[in-house]
Image (cartoon, rainbow, N blue to C red):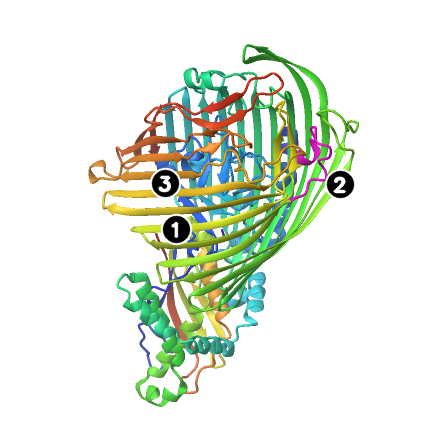
Amino acid sequence: MFDIHRSTIYHFFIASLVVHLVVAWPLLRDSWFAHPQQMDVQEWPALSIQMVIDERIASTPEKLQEKKQEKLNRNRIPQLAAVKQSTTSSSEEAAAEQAEEWLEQAVDEQPANSTAARATGDLRAQFLHRVIALIEQNKFYPKSARRRGIEADVRVSFRLHGDGSVSDVRLSDAPKILYGATQQAIMAAQPLPALPEEISAPFDISFIVKYQLTE
Amino acid sequence: MENGTKIIVTAVALSISVQAGVMAQEVDEATITVTATREADEVGKVAASVGRVGGEEIERIAPSHPSEIVNRIPGVHVNVTGGEGHMTAIRQPISTQPLYLYLEDGIPTRSTGFFNHNALYEINLPQAGAIEVLKGPGTALYGSDAIGGVINVVTRPAPLEPEADVAAEYGSYGWRRLLLSGGNGWESDGVRADLNMTHSDGWRDNTNYDRYSTSLRWDHDTRGGASLKTVASLSRIDQQTAGSSRLLEDDYLNNPELNYTPISYRKVDALRLSTAYETETADSLLSVIPYVRSNSMDMLPNWSLSYDPVVYETKNNSVGLLAKYRHNLADDVKMIIGVDVDYSPGSRYEQTIVPIKVGNIYTDYTIGSTIYDYDVIFTGISPYLHLDWQLTDALLLQTGVRSDQLGYDYDNHLTALDTGSHRRPADTSVSYQHLSPKLGLVYAINARHSTFISYRHAFRAPSESQLFRQGRAVSSVDLEPVKVDSYELGVRGNSPRQWNYSVSLYAMEKRDDILTYRYPDGSREVMNAGVTRHKGIELGYSRQLLDWMSMNLAWSVAEHVYDDWQPNATTDYSGNEMPSAPQTVASAALLFTPQALHGGSVELQWERLGSYWMDDENSYRYGGHDLYHLRTEFHVDDGIRISARVMNLADRRYATAAQYSAAAFGNPEKFEYAPGMPRSYYLGVSVGF
């Protein structure tokens, strides 16, 4: 019986090794042999970049805008209002409503308002809203991190150029699974919109992605 | 049981300031908050009935048998056949039929071709992280075997920090169990090791039971955001008396410790090894899981000693792959495509025995001739597609289809035989192709309540023993696969930490059900039945009654009927209820957690198994039984816990299986019962670091 087991185990380990090497090697190599505290976009593992690019094909900023407009057209606001009226509404729901409304508000902020915004300096804030909203669209809590109970704050900064390109992406040290998820969210949000002429380039942006688990 | 990610944005706080007049304009840091629950919370989004028992509950209950956990889920009944052996009844009668798919972390613990009804003793349940039960066909995402339900045992993940736990338990009838668990986590890795060593002298004569289980889990995260999870599990069971060992009525009532079949035994080894590679983005998830398995069983079955005494050894190894890719085609449309591959070579070697019987007791035996010696390879390739389409904010459409391509390649090492009671098919290959669709709608009434309706079609290929251990059947390799159509309507609601409920109504029709016909002389033949029908209602309700008291109720009523089954020209069971099919199954528990116990608890549980027919002819019924159990735990210190439990508090005499045989061939009629364990006591202590 255990002769069979040993043989089976042996073959499995060979197969498993092949899986690790072929599929995960670029990631393992990066995680085991290099521990940069900061990482430029150009240094990100090629496999991840390719996957993200593929997935972005159907999600250009124009399409995102269309999707958001579709949401508004489906009149989701009354739905949210209905939930608000519920006396049993939890804090999570309230927060979700707040976030939904915020996202919709960010989408609604059109260049038509930019005259007043320029006058007050709000244009930069509006633009930042827009950038953050795009990253929000792509955030997720990895299943692996959920299962293991991994939480962290990941500090992110990058430089946005006039044409919407990004450089000097820096992520603070964090558990790798959340570090990777943050990377994915930023990559998936690109290409970011070009800076309006009124905002001089480059535009340094920083924020924190806070991963929190609830019961 | 797709562990989908539910992300709720709980707060978005932006605080922005702009420093004008510099080349690089900077702003204060904004915060994006990503929250999620630790556990899968997709129950409200599935067009099927799902039950779940979490890790904390499993740890508190400290089950000495799987039934102590899963019987708390509405509509689920697992009985005790001896040791940790069991038969299962989910929307089906209590039986050994291959109607359930058992998974560990989503990976089948056995190959479809080599089903065994005792699957849960091959899994280290007392140290599991959770157990989930999907009731009814698990079409599309799961294939053959997933007819009555899918039972998924979730292993505990590696801890983030060093931890260790030692739990020792002593109990009645020589019960001793040691559970060891420990692990550690580093920057991107975590490991956990679990060990379960259990021994029982058994409460009946010659029913010793030893179990050794260990599992190792390694979690590795990559900087790119992917994860690798490797799990190795090994279980070894050494059991004296393989099954429930029924007694005649007089001994059942007056001398239940008696065991007519002390020569019976069962030795089981089960090994599983898998690595799950997973990478995801907000819009997609790729999961690739290669695995290997090895199962072997050496057994002298006790139930067939009177009509077909044998010993046999079965083995099978598996190499398989589970691959799936989830992609959000649009904001409202999620698609999962995947393929399951299973290559499982196995074998059976079986000999007759000549038992020596003194009175009613089989005391010894000698080995006779070899009756089966064959190799068989099971191969399965099953691509599937699953679609979630959010039609409106409240209405979700779920649909999917699975294509199963299954086959056996059978190589008989003995001569083919077409007479007698141990007939043998000649070398042959058998294959099955089947398409299984499903369609369901989930409607969110509001944030708390939802309802669903579903149609699910499933099929199950015959197992290798049904096909190639021919017995006295004229032909077994021509057995048709079982086909099932299931319709279900459900309502459920949930208010975290306050209450939750679920109500499900289902109706199933099985065509070509594979059943065992008992001849008057006691011998058996496996054959296709025409149609069987199954319908029922399941109710689950949990509520936090007071700060220090909560309740959990699981209740179901079912009816299982032979709609069309005529095993031969003179026998017609059409219209009869199926045997061993209890109408009512219920469990209710009151849990007290007063502050005076400093985190400890006292639980009183009631279990009800309703009456059922003891034979196909519907001649006599087993009356059912009620059992009461008491469990307590006290937290002496932060890391020290003392637990005590009393099972079958009222010391009720009850049967885990009951059967009636009419008088035939000069034998008198027989009422046979497998007695359940009398009142038993357990005391445990656990220390955590």
Q: Amino acid at mark 2?
A: Ser
| Camera-nearest residue between B202 and B246 | B246
Image quadrant assignment for residue A9: top right
Label 1 environment density (alpha carbons within 10 Å; few <14, some 14–19, many ≥20): many
SS state under label 1 = strand
Label 2 environment density (alpha carbons within 10 Å; few <14, some 14–19, many ≥20): some
The answer for how far apart the CA atoms under marks 2 and 1 are is 45 Å
* Magenta-span inclusion, residue A85: no
Task: Please report whichever mark, 3 or 2, sits nearer to the chain's N-terminal start.
Answer: 3
Left-right relation of A45 to B685: right
Q: Between tags 3 and 2, which lies in front?
A: 2
Q: Amino acid at mark 1?
A: Ser
Left-right relation of B263 to B688: right
Task: Look at the picture and state if A98 lies above or below B515.
Answer: below
Task: Please report whichever mark, 2 or 1, sits nearer to the chain's N-terminal start.
Answer: 2
Task: Look at the picture and state if B341 lies above or below A192.
Answer: above
Q: Amino acid at mark 3?
A: Glu
| Camera-nearest residue between B661 and B102 | B661
The residue segment tinted magenta is B465-481
Image quadrant assignment for residue B571: top right
Q: Give the residue at mark 3.
A: B57
Q: Give the residue at mark 1.
A: B502
Q: Give the residue at mark 2.
A: B429
How many labels, in total?
Answer: 3
Q: Residue at x 61, y 16 (%)?
A: B666
Q: Is residue A39 visible?
A: no
